[in-house]
Image: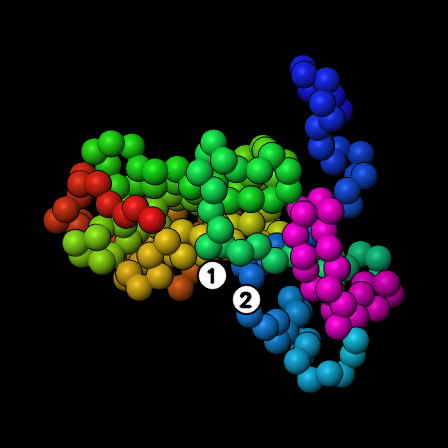
Amino acid sequence: MIDHTGAAVRSGARGEFGGLIPIRPATGNVAVCLRGHRLDLDLYDKLKPYSHRYRRHGTLCEVCRAQEGCDPGARRLAEWAHLDVTVQYEPDTAPGDGLVLVAHAPVAGTRAGRIELRLDGTEVGTVTASPCVSCRTATLDYVHVAAEYRRLGFGRTLVAAAVARAPSYRWTAPLPDGPVAQSFRARIAMRRPGQPCAHAGKAGLTR
């Protein structure tokens, strides 16, 4: 694809950079795969693939790959990519290629900040959160992932990105409507919000 300046633009629409694979927040050592197979016991070779679609390094479970090879209908979980959720770009400095997090500061007079998950410059998910520096609490207000990118871990990665901005705060999250949102909410280890923060309306977290 060529943009208006004549430069090449990545789209991935033809699969030239590989398909979509699951994503997980990066951790120091990966002990188990997405199906729970142990990766830390040197039972099988460890492969560290690179996703050209996301421009991220990842992990491949050989057991899962063999299992999926025998069952073409199995959900594809053998390979997943890692995203460092502490790396969050400002909107005007975010790379246009690959999978990146972009943090938007709260609007003046509010506490709610927003983090986008972008793939090749296009927003594919977003999370909003309202932290309070005075109370050292934060509320996870809203999480949304575009329908075609669900069940890949994008939502949980956005939640981790929000928490990464205030890891020592006490986090809460409201109960959403609808079965899909409720199923996702049930996997988030946060309690319901209690009484509204006394500092509501004041500017909150900055990084």
Q: Residue at x 21, y 41 (%)?
A: 203
Disc ID at residue 75: none
Residue furthest right in the image: 70
The residue mark sitting in front, 2 or 1, is 2
What percent of the width, then of the height, locates residue 113? 34, 41
Q: Which residues are magenta?
A: 46-70
Label 2 sits on residue = 27
Q: Earlier in the sequence, mark 2 or mark 1?
A: 2
Disc assigned to residue 187: 1
**How many marks are shown on the rendered structure?**
2
Amino acid type at circle 1 is Arg
Q: Is residue 195 left or right of residue 82?
A: left
Q: Which part of the image, by quadrant, shows the N terminus? A: top right
Q: What secondary structure is marked by label 2?
A: loop
Above/below status of 124 relative to 156: above
Between 119 and 200, the one lying in front of the other is: 119
- As shown in the figure, which amino acid type bears the numbered disc 2? Thr
Q: Who's the residue at 61% across and 71% down the image? A: 30
